[in-house]
Amino acid sequence: MRYFLSTLPIVSALGLAIACQPAPSGETPDTTSETISQARATYSASVFHQTTSFNMANSGGHSFSSQGRILISSDETGVFNAYSVDPATGDREALTTSNTNATYAVSWFPGDDRALVTADGGGDELNHIFVRELDGRLSDITPGEETKAFFMGWSPEGNDAWIATNERDQAAFDIYEYDTLSYESGVVFENTDALQIGAVSPDGNWLALVRNRTSADGDILLLDLSTPGATPEVVTEHEGNIAYGVYTFTPDSAQLVYATDEHGEFNQAWTMDMASGERAPLIEADWDVSFVSYSPSGRYQVVGINADGRTELSLTDLESGSAVALPDLPAGDLRNVRYSRDESQVAFLINAATSPSNLHVVDLNTQDHSQLTNALHPDITEAEMVDAQVVRFESFDGLEIPGIMYRPHGASADNPVPALVWVHGGPGGQSRIGYSATIQHLVNHGYAVYAANNRGSSGYGKTFYHMDDRHHGEADLQDIVAAGDYLRSLDWVADDQVAVIGGSYGGYITAAALTFHPEAFELGINIFGVTNWVRTLQSIPPWWESFREALYDEMGDPATDAERHERISPLFHAEHVIRPMLVIQGANDPRVLQVESDELVAAVRANGVPVEYVLFDDEGHGFRRRENRITASEAYLDFLNTYLTGNADQEEATGAD
């Protein structure tokens, strides 16, 4: 996987495209006078960010307790915590009450109402696993200053939690089984080759691992855990470049479900019989298969397809071979599907460009449906939001580039608006349709946003995906420059007010655009972006060891390619920057170190160019605290109003906070 610097997605979740058809390529629908009249008010960033975010518990655990309550994560207090939800009433009970570190729900215990949760240290990505005891206490069962841990699943009998940690070697994740009573642990698998952990079969007999040789090639290995002294064996011997990945095992442990791009442009789901080794296609589509999962008994199968920036999801009753019937649901992408233990209920989130994720539950026997949450701020309605449309344009060399367009209400040839090219994280990420408080806040204040999926983005086939290999900061950057030219060609865009914004790898592209194409954009907003590839590739976290070789194959080995890395790094050429820049950085970021932003800010200021710098002492690579997301969004708007449109004195909002 290449998303090592990926963050700030427009939507990162995978779900069902229930409605909202995209506009034809190259077109954006005009807004009706009725819609325009409904959307005149502008609102502060807090209105958009004071939505409540909801996430379901880990798909490999128990999202429904033995008593039928649903385990979720929510940031309703401004910081993520774990909650228990009554599916009958929607009433929520806080299981954790952190005011500082984001704490996320993982799984209920198999036999009681204890829960596993996870939290890191202020964005340092060193996540530990905690037990939320019945009396509310939190017990850290994976202690250690440099330890990173993640949950794998429960043992077949439910007596042990299987957890991967790098406590033995920071560069490798071993698997341990933790007794559910004593929390004492024993080694299940010692990962001496620093392989990527895939999945453990439900019967506990098989472990699937991945060796990433390059970003285009890799292998799956299987380890027979029931045989003492067994070693992982490659089961995908092949010639040439074929990428393999692990989805899951079937609930009866009879088959491994894996991903492969061997048979075309896109990742397909195939099965391998554990007894015979026989392979067979499971899901074939004209897009990537994003995930395959099953209900506890294996009766129901859930499949997600990454179809042009949104996920088409299917639920199948494998006993009858027919689609699972669901009642009429709100428009949006359905995601995080979780079945109750007796499979009588299914819970999921629905997310849309105009609506944050809300928790829903359906009784599969009666078709009764309940929406258990209302995530949107009460001062604003969906009608005042702007829907997203898939729009394509031809880049500098004729290659068609897809993207997601957000056109402000009222934008027209008679009322042209300023615009931003939004660059996703990665390399290899993808901008997708879904609710973004940051984007809706900008669009509400009259800024068009076009999230371009430049070459090298995932979701559009392996040829498109690998077009930027060892050419980062070159062809992909030219796609972003071309996206700015495309916006200027639209009669409803002010052609002298086009900026670029991006986070993580997108922050790098933003800084690179201002450095290597200094007149292409009027300004740039660089959100914790790489500025010095020489340092970044030398200082990657040790727990990335399983894909270090693949990363270096794509980006270049710092030991041999330092000259190119210096050539594409904005820091070493900052004297060329002549347009204003806003830089956002987290002090605890383990991927893009603070020094990267410190040095770039100092170098650009030396040019006499306006630079604003916002440093968050309690964040890492991304925003975990709502107050910081609000502060950042306000900074984006203030900077744009000052240096792009000259409207710095306009009121921030007419809506309530």
Image (cartoon, rainbow, N blue to C red):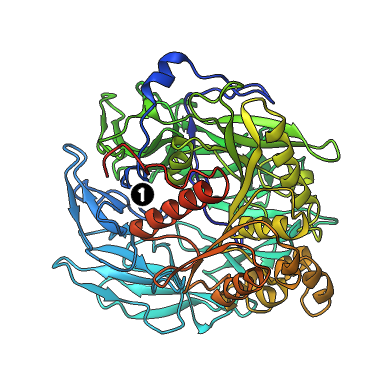
- Picture layout, residue 300 above or below residue 560: above
- Residue 119 visible in this rendered orientation of the protein: yes
Identify residue for label 1: 56
**653 or 27, nearer to the observer:** 653
Is 303 displayed left or right of 40 in the figure?
right
Residue 6, image x and y in percent?
58, 57
**154 or 520, nearer to the observer:** 520
Judged from the image, the secondary structure of the residue bearing numbered disc 1 is: strand
Residue in view at x 45 percent, y 59 percent: 203
- Give, as a three-letter code, the residue at label 1: Met
**178 or 243, nearer to the observer:** 243
For the N terminus, the quadrant is bottom right
Residue in view at x 16 percent, y 44 percent: 91
Residue 363, image x and y in percent?
27, 30
Residue 655 falls in image quadrant: top left
Is 253 displayed left or right of 183 in the figure?
right
- Picture layout, residue 71 above or below residue 377: below
Residue 367, image x and y in percent?
29, 24
Residue 548, image x and y in percent?
68, 71
Residue in view at x 69 percent, y 26 percent: 26
- Residue 1 visible in this rendered orientation of the protein: no
Residue in view at x 65 percent, y 23 percent: 27
For the C terminus, the quadrant is top left
- Picture layout, residue 511 above or below residue 248: below
Residue 538 falls in image quadrant: bottom right
Is 186 displayed left or right of 276 in the figure?
left
